[in-house]
């Protein structure tokens, strides 16, 4: 199914996803984490099939971003398991093991974290050259192709400070893609953007999902989540309250708390959330 064609659908009635039978790339079981004795995650179970786009939604402070940080090894859970393509994330203790894991798992943050003193091209080539061992010519060839993919082909020699927020975030996505990850984690990547540039970034993410890039998105963009997701997880107080296909969860949520959250989100969406361009 082409997700871009779904952009004209209404938020209230997202289209029914086609059934998928893919092997699991990410598996999380009984994940627990607390900070200073305060529980943050309280038994998270989540599976993402290879090629799926999965969204995690919920109120602020419900543990959404912490789940992503655990997946990438940036936070250490107290209990539970995380496997990526059969690799036990919690067992990766050495620097070499963690670097090898992060080659396979890309992370796009709320902030762009571009090197301000480097050109866009150099931002995209530094990791492939130093971590993957690519030649300058090969890394630059790939970088130009990725910049064209995110519609920034003319910005290769610009510096981050000369770009808009939406452009910088697209560069950050291209930089992540330069490492050819199996899985990309997106953590509220539009939250710091001007509303006029949100659609630029959402279109790029939507196209990646259409191409079969496995991704997990933490987002407050409900209409986009309804459009892009194969499956949606609603979290609150560190617990997955409800999950299911986008059509079911957004159109016919089973849990009363999910219904109340989505009612509030619908009002916010009608005010300012753009749908992706067809």
Image (cartoon, rainbow, N blue to C red):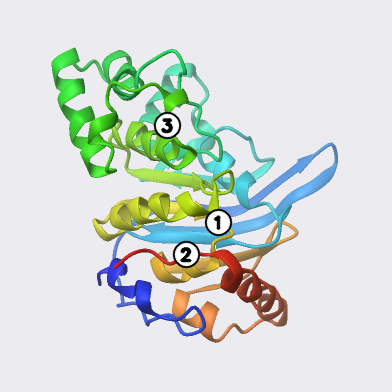
Which residue lies under the disc numbered 3?
A: 163
Indicate the secondary structure of the residue bearing disc 2.
loop
Alpha carbon of mark 2 to alpha carbon of mark 3: how far? 21 Å
Q: Which of marks 1 and 3 is in front?
A: 3
Q: Name the residue: 40% across, 44% down.
A: 184
Q: Residues within 10 Å of mark 3 (few under 14, many from 20)?
A: some
Mark earlier in primary sequence (2, 3): 3
Which residue is drawn at the image coordinates 24% and 32% (left, top)? 154
Find residue 273 and report its horizontal and vertical position in percent: 53, 65
- The total of numbered circles placed on residues is 3
Query: In this orientation, which residue lies closer to the viewer: 4 or 63?
Result: 4
Q: Residues within 10 Å of mark 1 (few under 14, many from 20)?
A: many
> Are circles 1 and 2 on residues that touch, CB within 8 Å?
no
Q: In which quadrant of the rendered image does the C terminus lie?
A: bottom left
Query: 124 or 237: which is nearer to us?
Result: 124
Q: Is residue 110 visible?
A: yes
Tag 3 secondary structure: loop
Image coords of residue 151 (percent x, y): 27, 43
Report how far apart the C-alphas of labels 1 and 3 lie in the structure: 23 Å
Q: Report the residue marked by disc 2.
A: 274
> How many other residues sit within 10 Å of disc 2, few (<14), some (14-19) or many (≥20)?
some
Q: Dot 1 corresponds to which residue? A: 219
10 or 3: nearer the viewer? 10
């Amino acid at each position: 199914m082409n997700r871009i064609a779904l952009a004209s659908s209404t938020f209230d009635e997202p289209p029914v996803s086609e059934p998928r039978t893919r092997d699991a790339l990410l598996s999380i079981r009984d994940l627990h984490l607390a900070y200073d004795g305060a529980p943050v995650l309280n038994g998270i179970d989540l599976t993402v099939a290879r090629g799926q786009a999965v969204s995690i939604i919920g109120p602020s402070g419900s543990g959404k971003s912490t789940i992503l940080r655990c997946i990438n090894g940036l936070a250490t859970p107290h209990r539970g398991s995380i496997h990526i393509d059969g690799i036990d994330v919690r067992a990766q203790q050495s620097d070499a093991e963690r670097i090898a894991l992060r080659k396979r798992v890309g992370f796009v943050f709320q902030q762009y974290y571009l090197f301000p003193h480097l050109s866009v091209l150099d931002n995209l080539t530094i990791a492939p050259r130093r971590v993957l061992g690519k030649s300058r010519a090969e890394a630059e060839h790939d970088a130009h192709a990725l910049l064209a993919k995110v519609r920034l082909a003319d910005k290769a020699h610009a510096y981050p400070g000369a770009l808009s927020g939406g452009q910088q975030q697209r560069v950050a996505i291209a930089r992540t893609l330069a490492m050819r990850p199996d899985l990309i984690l997106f953590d509220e990547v539009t939250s710091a953007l001007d509303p006029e540039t949100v659609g630029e970034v959402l279109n790029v993410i939507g196209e990646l999902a259409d191409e079969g890039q496995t991704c997990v998105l933490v987002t407050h963009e409900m209409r986009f989540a309804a459009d892009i997701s194969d499956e949606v997880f609603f979290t609150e107080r560190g617990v997955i309250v409800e999950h299911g296909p986008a059509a079911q969860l957004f159109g016919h949520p089973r849990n009363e708390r999910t219904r109340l959250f989505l009612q509030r989100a619908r009002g916010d969406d009608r005010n300012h959330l753009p749908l992706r361009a067809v």
